[in-house]
Every structure is written in C-alpha cells, then in structure tokens.
Image (tube, grey):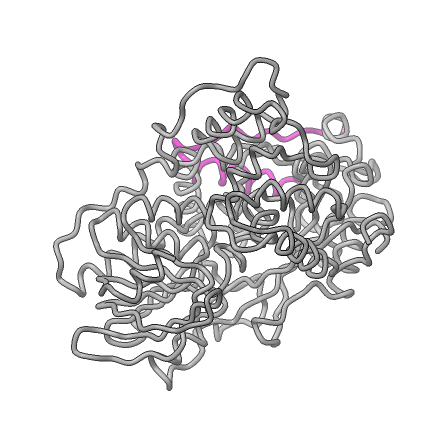
C-alpha cells in the first residue's frame, strides 16, 4: 500500500491521529496550507462517532436553554459553510416541534426560542420560522395527538450524510497531498529532537513501523484520553463521554412527514426522523462508564426511546417493531460543575497535551471545520512555519471539475438523485458507467436498491470491508437493518473488481457483515 510505505519513509510537519470528521478536517486544512501531513485511523474512516450521529448539521436549538449562545451562533455559521462547500451532503430541511399544554415547554417558550434561533442565524438563516395553531399543526402532521396540542413550530435546519462528510474530507485531504491510512493503529510514542515518533500497526498487513512528526494532533473522539496518556502519562481525564442511541423503525410504522422534535416525559428533547423506508428515533444522552471499545444499544436504551416516542405520539411501539439500532459515544469535555449530560457544554477544547502534541476534543459535527482551523492555527504558530491561509470555508469538498456528462436518457430518477446525493459532481462517473453498461444501472436488491455502478464507485473510496462499503460509503442507516444474503452477495460481487476480492473473500465479507449486523433485534427469518 503506497500510503503505508510513505508513512514509514517520510517525516511530516503534522501527524493527525483519528479518522473521524474532526481528524479528517484537521488533515485537510493542514495539507491545504502546504504542510506535509499524515492521517492515521485505527479502523475505518468515520467508523466511530462520526457515523453514529443524528445526521444533522444544526445550531443546536436545545443549547439555547443552557445559554450557549456563542456555540449556537458559531454552529449556525458553520452550518451555512457546510451547505456551501458540500451541497450534495447537507440540505436545508424544515423541522417540526409541537407544543402540548402541561408538558415540557409551553408554546410561548418554544416560539421565543425559535425567534432567537432565527436571530442568531442572521444572514445565514435558511427560512423564517412559523408557529402553527393546533389545527394547522395537525394538518401538517396528522400523527400528532390532538389532546392538549397547543400548536407547533416549524423551523429550518439541515440534515447531513455524516459518514460521507468524513470520507470525502479525507479524500480532499489526499488531493491536497496528505498521506492517509486507515486500519493503522497508533502504539507507543517517543519524543526526540525532531518531534515525536510513533509506532503504527498496519492491521491489514500485520506489521508495524515508525511515523515521524514535528507536531501531533490527537483527534480520536472518545479514544482521545487513552492516546493522551501515551504522550503525557500523568494527564488527568479530559473527557466524560456519553452514550447516544438511535432506534430504526419501518417508515410504515411511524410515517412522519418531517423530522420532528419531541419531548420525553422526563423533559428531554429527542427527534423522530423519516429517511426513505425508515424512521429513526433518538438520541439518548447518558453517562456510561464502560470501556469506549464496548458500546451497543441496550434493551433499556431501546425501551426508553420506544416509550418516549409512543408517549409523545399517543401510540405504542414494541421491541418487535425495531429494525435496527445504532449507538455512539459523544466525546464531551469533562465538566466538574455538573453530572447532567444535558447540561455539559458542547464547546470544543484544544489542549497542548505535551510539547509538540495537541488534543482537540468536544465540539459538534457541525463545527468540525472551525475546530480543525483552530487547532491547525495553534500548530502553525507553535512550529513557526510559513503556511498558507486557511481556505477550507471556501473550497468545495468535491471539486466541480470532477463532473462531466449527465445521466443517460431513461435513467431512473430516484437512482440519479441518490447518486448525486452520494457523490456530488463525481456522480457523473456513475452515469458514464450506466451509459457504457446498461446492466450496471439496475438495482442489486429491493431491500438495498443501489446499482452496480454506484457500488463500484463507492468501493474505490478506501474500502477494506463490506461493512465499510455498506454502512459508511453507500450509507444505508447503520445498525443492522435487514438485508438479504442475496443482495449482500451481489453488492460484494459488484465491488470485487475495485477492491480485489475473489469469490472466497466475497463470501467471507458477507458472512462477517451479517454476523456484525445482528445486534438488535434477532434477524428476521428471511435474512438468516
């Protein structure tokens, strides 16, 4: 692998550890400023927190309650930047938030909050909020229970394809000259005269080598404290991660029209979000002391969300309704002033962990670009190098020049839209394949209707496993949604030319995917 060979052979201005969206953003920013840059990730890109979010690019309406006005304003500005540089991955969307008499927030409080949210958006506002009376709210969303309904607010935020945002950020870092390698885990480190040297284990090839860097940035989310102790053994914990869980229901079981903010009986805000054939519900925000490598949705987590959604919508959901779940760590910065995860600030922190080594922690997916700019500024200043200015707020994530001809005549509109949402201007690579090979334009399965051309294109995005491909490149909702063995086999076969899988490897990948996906609930009979 060329990237691994370069990691072992070259010395770098900056080595970034952690291939989630923040680490990818740091590597992209540094490379675009002309710094020699390396990025290593122990697993797949975005396999941790960055693919386990609620998939919003938002200011954080609920953070107004904790008076985090600065955070909300910054996040709203970064939301606008994201919509500008990655319009295929982020899209403006109306959200609904109902108000019920005697429950959670009164109507007047919600309307004041929405007015303030609009005001903090300033010129980047996506649309003016509206407050509907009870009849108008029920016309817009018939699933809202009528009893006690005082009305509903409609406000604008954005949805984002979280894993693809990280992966395309890595890809643009590579275009800018960064050397990037997934499935490469950092081991022990040692400080020398020219900076730090870190042992990196190539988990694919089963070998290790040293990587040299003048500056190191730890952007490993919930894994950051473990890495920090390698650079500063006595460092106290910086993080207090919380667990966020989502459950996925068939859209037919919860056929909402818009993403809807709801209040649980304990006052917590959560969301129910329609997405194609599914509606997902989440998230929780609970303290959890288990090892960060050990995370899954528990029966208690699932029951909480099902009860909360049922209570808010006046219906009942059962565990048998759940098609899948996903769980992720929220890498919050430790706050000794509160034990309530809802009250912990989502502000980011840049810490100089040791001379020549920084940790970036906390923050929100929406503000990843600004977080990256902040830490690269710190590194540039510390190294005293002449670097180019930051351009990440203006440079498109996928260069427009990657585009070419449009889709062939007669192409399925839904497939065309999906390819454009996945790949942006580079969807024209898919369309060219459709023109050359009409068989590549047909769906590979009704349960996951991607075409062979889409799979081939996605498989060329630094893929090692079928899980990488399906969960994070093609971005089916994570969490073990039922996909038939036949569909998985066809996806593996379509990817094989790009990733070099023979028939035996394809079968092994299908088996591994199905074993890993069977988290909750038990797999339906037709998917065994």
Q: Position of residue 477 (x, y in %)?
A: 65, 46
Q: Is residue 58 visible?
A: no
- Give the percent coordinates (x, y) of residue 408: 54, 17
Q: Which residues are magenta?
A: 107-134
Q: Position of residue 297 (x, y in %)?
A: 70, 63
Foreground residue, 454 or 36?
454
Decide whether residue 377 is among the magenta residues.
Answer: no
Q: Quadrant of the C terminus?
A: bottom right
Which one is nearer the viewer's eye here, 18 or 363? 18
Q: Which x, y percent locates residue 467?
A: 61, 53
Q: Is residue 71 above or below residue 244?
A: above
For residue 190, above or below residue 79: below
In this view, which residue lies farthest toward the top?
409
Majority secondary structure in the magenta region = helix
What residue sits 30% from the left and 36% below the top?
A: 394
Snapshot quadrant of residue 286 = bottom right
Q: Residue at x 72, y 26 (%)?
A: 136
Q: How many dots with numbers?
A: 0
> Is residue 75 depicted above or below 410 in this figure?
below
């Amino acid at each position: 692998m060329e990237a691994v060979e370069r990691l072992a052979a070259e010395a770098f201005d900056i080595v970034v550890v952690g291939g989630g969206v923040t680490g990818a953003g740091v590597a992209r920013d540094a490379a675009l400023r002309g710094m020699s840059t390396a990025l290593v990730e122990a697993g797949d890109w975005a396999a941790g927190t960055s693919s386990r979010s609620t998939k919003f690019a938002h200011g954080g309406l609920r953070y107004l309650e904790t008076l985090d006005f600065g955070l909300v304003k910054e996040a709203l500005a970064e939301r606008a930047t994201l919509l500008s540089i990655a319009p295929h991955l982020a899209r403006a969307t109306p959200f609904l938030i109902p108000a019920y008499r005697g429950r959670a927030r009164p109507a007047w409080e919600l309307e004041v909050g929405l007015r303030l949210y609009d005001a903090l958006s300033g010129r980047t506002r996506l649309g003016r909020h509206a407050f509907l009376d009870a009849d108008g709210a029920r016309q817009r969303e018939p699933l809202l229970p009528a009893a006690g309904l005082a009305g509903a607010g409609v406000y604008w935020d954005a949805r984002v394809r979280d894993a693809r945002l990280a992966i395309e950020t890595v890809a643009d870092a590579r275009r800018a000259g960064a050397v990037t390698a997934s499935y490469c885990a950092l081991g022990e480190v040692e400080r020398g005269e020219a900076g730090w040297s870190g042992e990196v284990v190539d988990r694919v090839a089963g070998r290790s080598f040293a990587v040299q860097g003048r500056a190191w940035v730890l952007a490993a989310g919930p894994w950051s404290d473990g890495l920090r102790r390698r650079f500063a053994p006595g460092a106290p914990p910086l993080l207090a991660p919380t667990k966020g869980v989502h459950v996925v229901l068939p859209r037919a079981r919860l056929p909402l029209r818009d993403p809807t903010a709801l209040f649980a009986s304990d006052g917590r805000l959560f969301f129910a979000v329609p997405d194609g054939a599914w509606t997902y519900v989440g998230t929780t925000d609970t303290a959890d002391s288990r090892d960060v490598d050990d995370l899954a949705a528990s029966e208690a987590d699932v029951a909480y969300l099902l009860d909360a959604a049922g209570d808010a919508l006046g219906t009942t959901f059962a565990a048998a309704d759940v098609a899948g779940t996903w769980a992720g760590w929220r890498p919050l910065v430790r706050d000794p002033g509160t034990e309530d995860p809802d009250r912990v600030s989502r502000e980011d922190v840049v810490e100089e962990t040791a001379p020549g080594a920084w940790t970036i922690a906390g923050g929100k997916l929406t503000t990843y670009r600004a977080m990256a700019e902040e830490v690269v500024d710190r590194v540039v200043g510390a190294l005293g190098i002449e670097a180019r200015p930051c351009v990440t707020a203006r440079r498109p994530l996928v260069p427009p020049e990657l585009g070419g001809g449009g889709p062939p005549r007669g192409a399925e509109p839904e497939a065309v839209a999906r390819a454009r949402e996945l790949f942006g201007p580079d969807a024209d690579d898919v369309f060219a394949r459709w023109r050359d090979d009409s068989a590549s334009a047909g769906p590979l399965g009704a349960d996951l209707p991607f075409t062979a051309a889409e799979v081939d294109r996605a498989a060329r995005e630094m893929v090692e496993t079928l899980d990488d491909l399906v969960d994070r490149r093609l971005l089916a909702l994570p969490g073990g949604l039922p996909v038939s063995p036949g569909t998985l086999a066809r996806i593996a076969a379509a990817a094989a030319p790009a990733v070099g899988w023979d028939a035996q490897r394809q079968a092994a990948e299908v088996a591994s995917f199905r074993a890993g996906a069977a988290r909750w609930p038990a797999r339906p009979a037709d998917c065994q």
